[in-house]
Image (tube, rainbow, N blue to C red):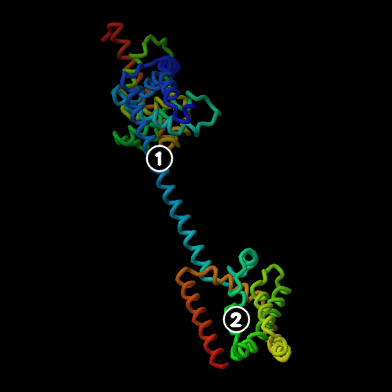
Amino acid sequence: MEADFREKLNKREIIPSNHAWDRLDAMLTAADEKKPKSNYTWLFIAAGFVGLLLVATLFFKNSSPQDAIQNEVVIENNNVKETPKDTEINQPLTPQVAPETQLALESEIPIKGKERISNKKQVAPQLNANQNQVAENKSNRPKVATPTHVITNAVAVQEVQVDDLIANSENATRESYKKQLVKVDANALLSQVDSELELSFRERALQVVNKNYKTVKVALSTRNQE
Amino acid sequence: MAVDNNRQAQQKIYTQYAPKMLSVCRQYIKDIHHAEDLMITAFMKVFTHLKNFENKGSFEGWIRRIMVNECISFIRVQKKVSFLEDEYYKEDTFNNIESRFNVDDIQSLIDGLPDGYKMIFNLYAIEGFKHKEIADMLGINEGTSKSQLSHARRILQEQINKLKNYENGTE
């Protein structure tokens, strides 16, 4: 009897109403429209997470500049090689560089008096020392370009016939600069250059002003000494 | 294709299985409109969880199971059917009589049962579940399922006897 019930009920089919599929279609459409919203929500969450990661990365990168400098020394080295910056390379030796720039200016002017020559007396040895220093730096870091205008200026000074004065003071200045050159660390120089390159515009502007101020200060002090 | 929310494929599945599934829902729900509502809701679940179907059993059986679960949930929630922990039952069956009832008569007989008895009878006699499975499905004891079935059979037997007597003109 139950088997008969089962057989007859399983064979039975009841046709649904005509709008049954329309209702189901509407429900499916509504469900499909809900899905993209949740996807966008997850997208926003993921984007926020990535943004936080970026901010955190930048923050920690700025908080540990030593690591960044150590990692980027090689890269910045290449930059220096491409665009040599004489002033930045010689920055630790600013007292010596400042006369050099003066010399470059004076070498273009015809020398008439003894005073000018006396200036050359002091400047020329320093110039030679700078040449030596550049050569030293060159030997330490062969990839760094040498400032060519220093050499040309040296030739100009020689034309003014101050060879005898240069020869007298050369030995003394050379020894003193050798001591100073020993203290110069190529990595420290590069690190300093790197740190300067990474600074913000405001800090860079301040540094340039500061550097120029020091240059003027040294020039003035040198002139006063003379 | 229906897995990818292809509406035409979904409609094809619906057209193929909806008549049988509405019949299944009608076994449990007396009102045809409510039965259709449940069928639509169950089809919605079918299409939503279509990717979960593993090709282990028949697809029709899987859909049928979803329909049955939907009807049971509806009855238990809407009609607040509870089963008395009555473990008294008798291993009785119908009298071995030749059935002359058509499907509408059978449905009328089942509709005459209380909701709890009807549910157990449908699950056991029509769907072919075992008492253990029914007990797990409804969260009741196995003995309760047996006693509910026994009561359902007794009521059905009484109604069949009444119908037979009515046809024979004895009542």
Farthest top residue in view: B168
Which residue has dot 1 on it? A36
Q: Position of residue A21 (x, y in %)?
A: 35, 23
The residue at 30%/6% (across/down) is B168
The residue at 51%/68% (across/down) is A62
Circle 1 packing at 10 Å, graded few (<14), some (14-19), many (20+), is few
The relative height of residue A105 versus residue B88 in the rendered view (above or below) is: below
Residue B95 visible, this angle:
no
Left-right relation of A193 to A30: right
Labels 1 and 2 share a subunit: yes
For residue B31, which numbered disc appears in the image?
none
Q: Quadrant of the N terminus of chain A?
A: top left
Q: Position of residue B29 (x, y in %)?
A: 32, 25
Q: Position of residue A23 (x, y in %)?
A: 32, 26
Which quadrant holds residue B64?
A: top left
Q: Given the image, on which type of amino acid does mark 1 rest?
A: Pro
Q: Given the image, on which type of amino acid does mark 2 rest?
A: Pro
Question: Which chain hosts label 1?
Answer: A
The relative height of residue B57 versus residue B164 in the rendered view (above or below) is: below
Question: Which chain hosts label 2?
Answer: A
Circle 2 packing at 10 Å, graded few (<14), some (14-19), many (20+), is few
Could you say which is closer to the camera, residue B94 or residue A105?
Answer: A105
Counting the numbered discs, the total is 2
Could you say which is closer to the camera, residue A18 or residue A142?
Answer: A142
Which residue has dot 2 on it? A110
